Image: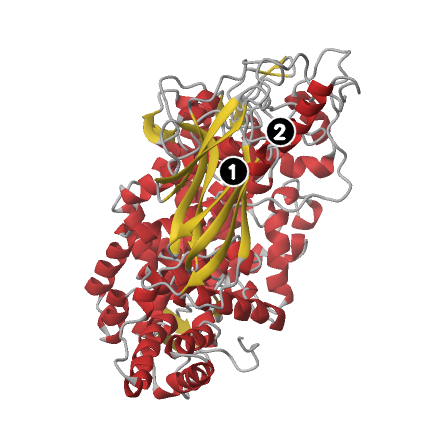
Amino acid sequence: MAPSMISCPHQEVFMPLLRALGAVLAAGVVLQPAAAAGQADLPSRALLDRYCVTCHNERLKTAGVMFDQVDISRVAEHRELPEKVCRTRRRGQRPPYGRPRPGRPEATAFVTALEAELDKVGAAAPNPGRVASHRLNRTQYVNAVRDLLDLEIDGEALLPSDMAGFGFDNNADVLAMTPALMDRYITAATKVSRLAVGTLENRPAIQTYRLPTATRQDARMGEDLPFATHGGLAARHTFPLDGDYLFKIRLERGDVGGTIRGNIAERVYHIELRIDHALMERLTVGGEFEGQVKYTLTGGGIAPPDDDLVHQRIALYNQTADQDLEVRFPVKAGTRLVSAAFTNVAPSASQGVGDNMVAGIASLEIHGPYGGKVPAATSSRERIFVCRPSDPQDEEPCARTIVSTLARRAYRRPVTDADLGPLMEIYAIGRAAGDFETGVARALEALLSMPAFLMRAEADPADAPAGTIYRISDLELASRLAAFLWKSIPDEELLDAATRGELRDPAVLARQTRRMLADRRAVRWMNDFLGQWLQTRNLETILPDPLRFPGYDSTLREGLIRETELFFESQVREDRSVLDLLRADYTYLNARLAEHYGIADVYGSHFRRVPVTEPARQGLLGHGSVLTVTSYADRTSVVLRGKWVLETLLGAPPPPPPANVPPLPENDGQSEPASLRERMEQHRSNPVCASCHATMDQLGFALENFDAIGRWRVEDEGAPIDSAISWRETDIDSPAAFREALLRQAEDELVHTITEKLLTYALGRGVDYLDAPAVRQIVRDAARDDYRWSSLVLGIVESAPFQQRIVRESGQQAEQ
């Protein structure tokens, strides 16, 4: 039968790929005709002829792609199309059942041969891409200030949040500098310089630290709080000057009438206020009407009768008992740990008449400084004042030494007279208006506002023609490395090695990379990458329905996030295989999270490593953080979970849904309850939805035994859970079986996806088809070391995209 007479039943399967390829064809890419007669066909040519040309030919032009016109042996002339074909086949997209389909060995041979040709082309004509100039995002700014000045700052209060590009907020394309944003950085520089130097320009201010409403406070709240306490909060607060500070504690109130929780009228509570773990004050509140409360005053806004003077006084006390919970005392300047928590001698929740909750701390206010004095020494001042002038004539040379030392670290390179000139001019203005330290503070403020600090730019070689590929300088490489692994600026050792030109030595570069991975600062990239890759950062904005999930609060949410962070950190620091993310038989729990999961014999608030014997709970797929972030507020979502697996683990995000998708039908409470699977079947009866949901929903159903906050369950609203699916011709009947299927059937996709995500994060730009040969090389090299994390990180650092750059083409948009 002629091709024109044949319909294409697997058009929907290839349509997402082919629509993307249509842009390539529309841009004028001409696919070369097949090889001339007499030239032996490659295996891939035969596969195309047998399985693809039926629909995708010159006559039908299905989706605008004609595989009968593709010469696979000449991929150098049209690299994007073959790369997308390989990517699609690697991710398991195949013609639908009922049509001829290549077997796994045949398909693997096809992809392997095509990728080999593409890798040859990539080696002969490399293109490492080009990273635009980076603005320090908020996280990097906070870390850079900490590493430069040994100063803790509140980035959220100083700078707005950053947009994300290609899944990460360090993407250069979205880190533009606008005039309004520059104003925020200048304001931040003023505050930071005053805090770091400790000038008398630090006026009294109020900083309030709050606990989220309805947080459970019946146990120790974290490692920063003392043993034998419960509830409360801890915060790292920067005291700008030596002086007096006022501390005010406010207790949590109920929803009605502003009444303090915890039957404050009858129960006595003791609160300890500590700084750097040292007890500063023990405050007592409550119990003024012990034994006198005859009925509750907290429900429905009911006021006591006019003639009940005792309960009127009690009602007033219930609203004002914490008004005297304040104390003032002197504190030395510096960043210190401040905590306020209840001692464990407080009464039980059942004592007296009234609500059955213990009291909770709502906020801690810190006012000051009052009578402030410039501190003699803080860690920030020691970092800044590397010299002291002995007389007026020494002031300018000493200031120059201070400014040049700071600028070298801040600018991530040796500084020149041209760099120092403007800073010293500003120092002189400050010195004339005040004293030596005032001048240094002004110079520091200017330094923190300079583009050389705020922007990470890389310069093309002078007179290099467009398209030239060159190795970036050692100093630029050191800056890339520090931004990747420390989310900050290089330290002295890395900067010194770069200044000496030693990073071009592969052995030195590998040694520095391993040193940085082992450093405590490496946890920054681990947590930052993890939270954005797995999307667990979004837990901060997810609020499960309190009626359906009354046990979920901010403490549990933070515990879910902390579990996954500690788990990932252990994977990297122990240099495990990236596949252990799914198959590891341990996790990190505290008592609250263990109770949530139903795991016994875990006590206390501190997290510790715990073996996981239940197969369903092993690996990331059993983490409550992942399971909660892929659910709705009131129920699970097989769509969100399936999409998460496709996008996050398999690197195959589905297309956006069409408009006006109807909601799922809800159980009416009268007829036999329908399971989520039955309701989704109704949803997928729409052919428009079925093309994507047939695969996506299957992956989500495999995790249906976990509810919307990650607890195990066997039924949903009275209907039994059915988590059985068939995926890639494999029958799966449990979350554990699903995990094993992923490891067995999709190992290559898992490793490639993690590598692509990590390379995207490391470069600060999107990864495209030109980077595919580098990704495959990194994966091949890591395979020889069981895909250990050090192999992936070193492979990325040693790759052409990380170490090289291409000169911008003429007419290409200039970088900021």
Measuring from the top left, give residue 638's x and y in whole percent: 60, 30
Location of residue 370 in the rendering, given as x and y in whole percent from the top left corner: 49, 57
| Residue type, label 1 | Val
Dividing the picture into quarters, in which one does residue 488 lie? bottom left
- Residue 104 has which mark? none
Per the model, the C-alpha gap separating discs 2 and 1 is 45 Å
Please name the residue that numbered disc 2 is placed on. Answer: 260
Above or below, 608 relative to 265: below
Q: Nearer the viewer, residue 211 or 303?
A: 303
Q: Secondary structure at mark 2?
A: loop
Assign a secondary structure to mark 1. helix
Residue 102 coordinates in the image, percent (x, y): 49, 40
Which numbered disc, 2 or 1, marks the residue that appears first in the sequence?
Answer: 2
Q: Position of residue 460 (x, y in %)?
A: 42, 80
Q: Quadrant of residue 26?
A: bottom right
Extreme-right residue of the structure = 306
> In the figure, 142 relative to 741: above or below?
below
The residue singled out by tag 1 in the image is: 645
